[in-house]
Image (tube, rainbow, N blue to C red):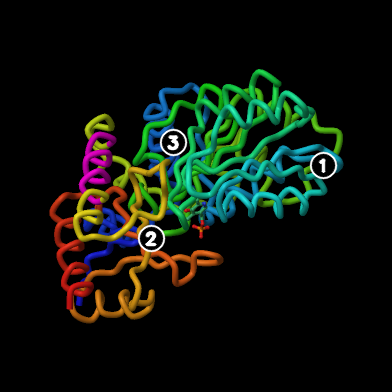
Amino acid sequence: MSYLIMTAGPTPVAENVRLKRSEISKNPRFDTSFIEDYKSVTSKISHYLNTKNATHILCGEGILGLEAACASLVEPGDRCLVITNGIFGDDFADFIKLYDGEVVVFDADRLNGIDVNKLEDFLNIDHDFKVATLVHCDTPSGVLNPVEDICSLLKKYSILTIVDSVSAFPGIKVDVSNIDILLGGSQKCYCAETGLTIVTVSDEAWKVMESRKTFIKSYYANLLKFKDYNFPYSMPVNDIASFKVAVDNIGDINAFWERHKQVAHLCRSKVLEMGLSLHLQSGFSDTVTVFNIPKGFDEAGVINEMIDKYNIIISGSFAYLKNKVLRIGHMGESAKEEYITKTINSLNEIFNK
Ligand SMILES: *Cc1c(COP(=O)(O)O)cnc(C)c1O
């Protein structure tokens, strides 16, 4: 049985990606293709970001990248600003505390993208921070934040910026000129299997890591280990080879971004046409549409009926949004007009019974 996967991740993995992953594994000691694939895919991602900043891939899912960024930049006592309007945004505070940083939270309205003017007022009063964290698309609510504007503001105060773009890039264009560490995950818009995290690091961030007064208190989550080696440990040969195929599948990146924009617009207008209400007031992401569950229905009931009757998988949400909203992912392979139409038509049948 195959399903139409319209979740907010993991996303559908194309056949050529799956087949590549199942090839007989070469031994990287005798075969240089791993290093070639690794260099090719990481430089392609930096190219999509239009940056000279180096991209590296760690073997572990998105969360590992978030932790590695905090572990590598935060030293005991460092003041860090956690800019948040969502669940992933909040969670950065835990990573910073884990590495003994001092957390200050800028808690923003959860139904709209972060208001840069309000953040500016806040920073006018207090801007003594080494690092700031924020999330590009906070997936459980789908809220999209203006990360470029926020990071250029933070840079005026020389604050290092960590941006979780796991559920946005490469589906949404991002300019990393003011972003010190940009984080991605293989199972979202890249449409590869879960298990790789992608980090793009600025020269300034490397310098800060290299001039730390204290050791990085993690072995695997130490980004410096990845700086000079292409991959410092046993090489995930097939994961990288298949990830490269997934990144090649993106094709023309401008067309890819445009497709995400159009599909997201289509999805939101169809949700409204059904008479449902969108969860957010503004700050809609091109990668996920989040709508309120109408009266008389519940999360599990709708999700199960979508699977059982229509073979379509959509997402619920979690924490304070559990049983409040449903989410349709349109990321990479699933960001196609025909899939949106099919998903919406099926939901329409369920809600109009
Ligand atoms: C999926 C996701 C992550 C990574 O979570 P994993 O479970 O480790 O893949 C991080 N941040 C956001 C915003 C995400 O959507």
The residue at label 2 has a CB less than 8 Å from ligand 1: no
Q: Which mark sits nearer the N-terminus, 2 or 1? A: 2
Are there few (<14), some (14-19), or many (20+) residues within 10 Å of tag 3? Answer: many
Q: Toward which corner of the image does residue 329 lie, by quadrant?
A: bottom left
334 and 240: which is toward the camera = 334
Q: Which residue is mark 2?
A: 10
Relative to 258, 181 lies left or right: right
Indicate the position of residue 144 as horizontal and vertical percent values.
45, 42
Q: Which residues are magenta?
A: 257-267
Residue type, label 1: Phe
The residue at label 1 has a CB less than 8 Å from ligand 1: no
Residue type, label 3: Thr
Residue type, label 2: Pro
Q: Can you tell which of label 2 and label 1 is closer to the viewer?
A: 2
Q: Secondary structure at mark 3?
A: helix
Quadrant in the picture for the N terminus? bottom left
Indicate the position of residue 255 as horizontal and vertical percent values.
22, 33
Above or below, 180 relative to 248:
above
Q: Which residue is mark 1?
A: 215
Q: Which residue is mark 3?
A: 42
Above or below, 117 relative to 313:
above
Residue at the far top in the pictured view: 156
Q: Residue at x 44, y 72 (%)?
A: 323
Are there few (<14), some (14-19), or many (20+) residues within 10 Å of tag 2? Answer: many
| Magenta-span inclusion, residue 64 | no
Indicate the position of residue 138 as horizontal and vertical percent values.
49, 49
Q: Residue at x 33, y 80 (%)?
A: 301
Q: Can you tell which of label 3 and label 2 is closer to the viewer?
A: 2
Relative to 266, 31 lies left or right: right
Disc marking residue 232: none
Indicate the position of residue 252 as horizontal and vertical percent values.
23, 32
